[in-house]
Image (cartoon, helix red, strand yellow):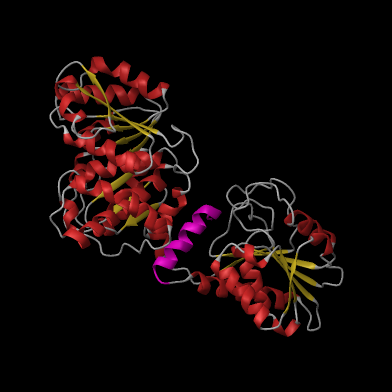
């Protein structure tokens, strides 16, 4: 089962792999047409009701596949307001083919009284609010007619993310859904049609994984809505926490705070004007700092990045364990903080970002090839109870129930500090997405940003060079031109 949002991401990944939206629409339309033929007599009257979204475009294409029935086509609204290029193309083809196609300005004029079969493409699976006009009246007209109703993807009015019906919905006799069942379609009367989406579109992280969360960043939000990131790091190392905080900002977070020992506060502050540095006494993290840090993170609902540059002093390890024991928010655990996790009972929502050596030290499987060890890593994540993003030539991301592989990257990403960038990016996305989706999007963005840099300057870039590539890479993925990230990389990520 896939939600509507996840399905949209998978379709975008399929496009990046070479299976275009038009191909998917044609295969989907053919599946709908087959269902109509199984239920319609040779002389049946077929009516197609199409909205202006992607599923409306499938309904328009289905009408072309059903030419032998001379179907009537009612487009709800103005053709120029059709939302997708594929749907617009299918409307243009229907008109140019001289099918019985008309746009319906007033849904009260929709007449389905003589229809034997109605194809419902009024609203798509991403519906999350009660239908408004003209779709509301169209749904009521479909439900009032005596025809056999076949819905495209989901019955119009059903929320394909939750399975709920926020208002009225079509009472379909049959639903033809595509690739996978959607929430709310657990009952009989559903055909799941194979439309040619490769399994790789689900398995491998692609631009769709970024698009699925991109709309939740910034836009018309107010300051703070896109998240506060609280980096707890530094001591032996100063650059690591600064890289994480800056990456979070470039990834869409609104504010980045750093809690660092006062001994390194000045150099950390000097890395960028955008960082808000909050020093505490001492040269490294100690257990007596924990209550204040937990209080700050909890009071402001921060997403925490715990670990960059902390070092491995015994007192620091004790402090990390104490923090995780007391904290119940969201956190990315990286670098020196990772080994503390197995021995801690915590209510926090964690994403751990080990490389293969750190995974081994964590008690996980010892692996040479991540791709061949995904089942073992998924099982370990399930036992651990936390999401993992394991970094090597590829990044394997799992929450213990589902696993994806991020292939984007370049050998140049073995340079020190790229793991800190990844941790900050993951934290930015964790503020608006669940752990699996956040880590997948971060892995793709970091990998593609590295590819962009390598194309421009060669292999000799450093981790801080990635920062300015983050926002353009997110924008590129959101435009549908993110590529499949299939180059991969070589070596162990820092």
Examine the rendering and report whether any part of residue 195 can be seen.
no
Residue 171's place in the image compared with 243, above or below, is below
Quadrant in the rendering for residue 142: bottom right
Range of magenta residues: 1-18
Residue with the most extreme right position = 113
Say which of 320 and 487 sits in front: 487
Q: Is residue 194 magenta?
A: no
- Left or right relative to 217: residue 448: left
- Left or right relative to 21: residue 125: right
Q: Position of residue 324 (x, y in %)?
A: 32, 26
* The N terminus lies in quadrant: bottom right
Quadrant in the rendering for residue 287: top left
Examine the rendering and report whether any part of residue 351 can be seen.
yes
Say which of 339 and 433 sits in front: 433
Q: Is residue 9 magenta?
A: yes
Q: Position of residue 427 (x, y in %)?
A: 35, 38
Residue 94's place in the image compared with 252, above or below, is below
Quadrant in the rendering for residue 345: top left
Say which of 68 and 314 sits in front: 68
Q: Position of residue 334 (x, y in %)?
A: 25, 37
Q: Position of residue 199 (x, y in %)?
A: 43, 65
Residue 61's place in the image compared with 179, above or below, is below
Per the picture, the main secondary structure of the magenta-coloured stretch is helix
What's the residue at 44%, 49% (across, down)?
214
Say which of 198 and 8 sits in front: 8
What's the residue at 18%, 31% (across, down)?
270
């Amino acid at each position: 089962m896939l939600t509507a949002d996840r399905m949209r991401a998978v379709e975008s990944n399929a496009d990046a792999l070479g299976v275009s939206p038009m191909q998917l629409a044609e295969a989907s339309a053919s599946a709908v047409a087959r269902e109509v033929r199984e239920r319609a007599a040779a002389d049946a009257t077929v009516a197609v009701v199409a909205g202006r979204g992607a599923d409306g475009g499938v309904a328009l294409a289905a009408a072309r596949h059903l030419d032998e029935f001379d179907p009537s086509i009612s487009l709800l609204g103005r053709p120029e307001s059709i939302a997708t290029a594929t749907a617009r193309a299918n409307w243009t083809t229907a008109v140019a083919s001289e099918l019985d196609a008309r746009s319906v300005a007033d849904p009260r004029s929709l007449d389905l009284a003589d229809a034997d079969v109605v194809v419902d493409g009024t609203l798509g699976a991403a519906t999350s609010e009660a239908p408004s006009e003209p779709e509301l009246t169209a749904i009521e007209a479909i439900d009032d007619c005596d025809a056999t109703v076949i819905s495209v993807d989901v019955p119009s009015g059903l929320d394909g993310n939750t399975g709920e019906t926020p208002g009225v919905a079509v009472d379909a006799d049959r639903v033809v859904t595509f690739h996978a069942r959607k929430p709310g379609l657990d009952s009989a009367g559903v055909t799941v049609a194979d439309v040619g989406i490769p399994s790789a579109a689900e398995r491998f992280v692609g631009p769709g994984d970024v698009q699925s969360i991109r709309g939740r960043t910034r836009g018309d939000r107010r300051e703070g809505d896109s998240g506060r990131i609280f980096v707890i790091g530094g001591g032996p190392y100063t650059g690591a926490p600064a890289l994480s905080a800056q990456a979070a900002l470039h990834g869409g977070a609104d504010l980045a705070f750093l809690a660092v020992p006062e001994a390194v506060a000045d150099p950390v502050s000097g890395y960028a004007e955008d960082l808000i540095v909050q020093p505490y006494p001492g040269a490294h993290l100690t257990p007596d700092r924990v209550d204040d840090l937990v209080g700050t993170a909890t009071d402001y609902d921060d997403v925490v990045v715990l670990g960059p540059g902390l070092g491995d002093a015994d007192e620091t390890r004790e402090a990390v364990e104490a923090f995780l024991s007391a904290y119940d928010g969201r956190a990315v655990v990286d670098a020196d903080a990772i080994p503390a996790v197995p021995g801690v009972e915590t209510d926090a929502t964690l994403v751990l970002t080990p490389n293969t050596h750190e995974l081994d030290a964590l008690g996980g499987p010892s692996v040479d090839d991540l791709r061949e060890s995904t089942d073992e890593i998924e099982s370990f994540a399930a036992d651990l109870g936390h999401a993992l993003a394991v970094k090597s030539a590829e990044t394997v991301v799992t929450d213990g129930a589902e696993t994806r592989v991020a292939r984007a990257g370049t050998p140049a990403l073995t340079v020190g500090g790229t793991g800190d960038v990844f941790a900050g990016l993951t934290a930015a996305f964790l503020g608006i997405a669940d752990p699996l989706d956040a880590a997948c999007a971060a892995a793709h963005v970091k990998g593609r940003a590295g590819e962009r840099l390598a194309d421009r300057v060669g292999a000799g870039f450093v981790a801080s060079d990635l920062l300015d590539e983050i926002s353009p890479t997110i924008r590129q993925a959101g435009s549908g031109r993110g590529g499949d990230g299939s180059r991969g990389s070589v070596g162990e990520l820092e």
